[in-house]
Amino acid sequence: MSAGISGRTFQAAAEQGRKALVAYYPVGFPDVPGSLDVLRTLCGEGDQPGADLIEIGLPYSDPVMDGVVIQRAGTRALARGVRTRDVFTAVETVASTGTTPVVMTYWNLVDRYGVDAFARDLAAAGGAGLITPDLVPDEASDWFEASDAHGLDRIFLVSPSSTDERIVATANACRGWMYATAVMGVTGTRTASSSAAPELVSRIRALAPDTLVGVGLGVSNGDQAADVATFADGVIVGSAFIKPALAADDAGTPGDLSGIRAVLTDLAAGVRR
């Protein structure tokens, strides 16, 4: 697997003796300008370490693979007028800070925009690549062509139910890193699914040893981030950043980023333990 732009971000964190923190946040919530403020905050401020890589989510009307928290934020973003093109402004905002941006989106939005046009505009905005949760490599010929033409990373997903053959094929298709999905237990508890993440990463290491692996979903605090950092190259966090944003929006203070800053401080410390 080629490390690509986003993979080199993981490698840079490793050179500092730690793992990469990957932060997910949807463009358009609480509104487009407000989401840009959140993204700047997630990139770090002053002496405050930020995320190493930002996953910019593109809200979708039928988010069947998203959890309740992300769905709530996405629904509000759509109601308040977010559009596909706003994601490129978000990418530019993140890239301008020196932080690596990627976009995470359902494939239908890319297809409707035009695959090559989306790749062209993403690259022009400074984006490193695309995470495509509902697109499998077998059906991605258009994306292979467009990503190669515009020098973008391809980040596909695997899960604990993926066969060995699927893991190998996905690793070969990826450029940058591989997204391993596994739900972590909440603080103080461990459910049956909590062991799925290290087991899945162990399988990936055995089958595709050169593959960089980011792990989500469900990490919510620094302790869990430190735990995931013992076996993954990148720790992916989404809902933990969105929850305080939703709380601020519900309270009528959507510009209050203090809750997000507190979560970021905790998580950034977690990947550095």
Image: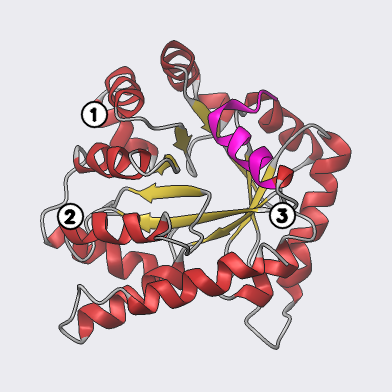
When asked about the image quadrant of residue 231, the answer is bottom right
Asked if the residues shown at circle 3 and circle 1 are in contact, with their CB atoms under 8 angstroms apart, the answer is no
* Rendered location of residue 204, percent (x, y): 79, 42
**Element type at mark 2:** helix
State the residue at coordinates (30%, 73%): 257
* Rendered location of residue 192, percent (x, y): 75, 75
Q: Residue furthest right?
A: 206
Observer-side mark, 3 or 2, equals 3
Q: Residues within 10 Å of mark 3 (few under 14, many from 20)?
A: many
Q: Is residue 42 magenta?
A: no
Q: CA distance from mark 3 to mark 2?
A: 32 Å
The amino acid on which the numbered mark 3 sits, given as a three-letter code, is Arg
The residue tagged 3 is: 18
State the residue at coordinates (28%, 51%): 60
Q: Quadrant of the N terminus?
A: top right
State the residue at coordinates (20%, 62%): 34
Residue in front for this viewpoint, 161 or 88? 88
Give the magenta part as a residue range.
Answer: 1-13
The residue tagged 1 is: 113
Q: Earlier in the sequence, mark 3 or mark 2?
A: 3
Q: How many marks?
A: 3
When asked about the image quadrant of residue 221, the answer is bottom right
* Rendered location of residue 91, percent (x, y): 32, 40
The residue tagged 2 is: 32
Observer-side mark, 3 or 1, equals 3
Residue 203 vs 271, above or below: the answer is above
Q: Is residue 11 magenta?
A: yes
Residue 57 vs 240, above or below: the answer is above
Name the side, left or right, on which 264 lies relative to 137: left
When asked about the image quadrant of residue 8, the answer is top right
State the residue at coordinates (35%, 61%): 41
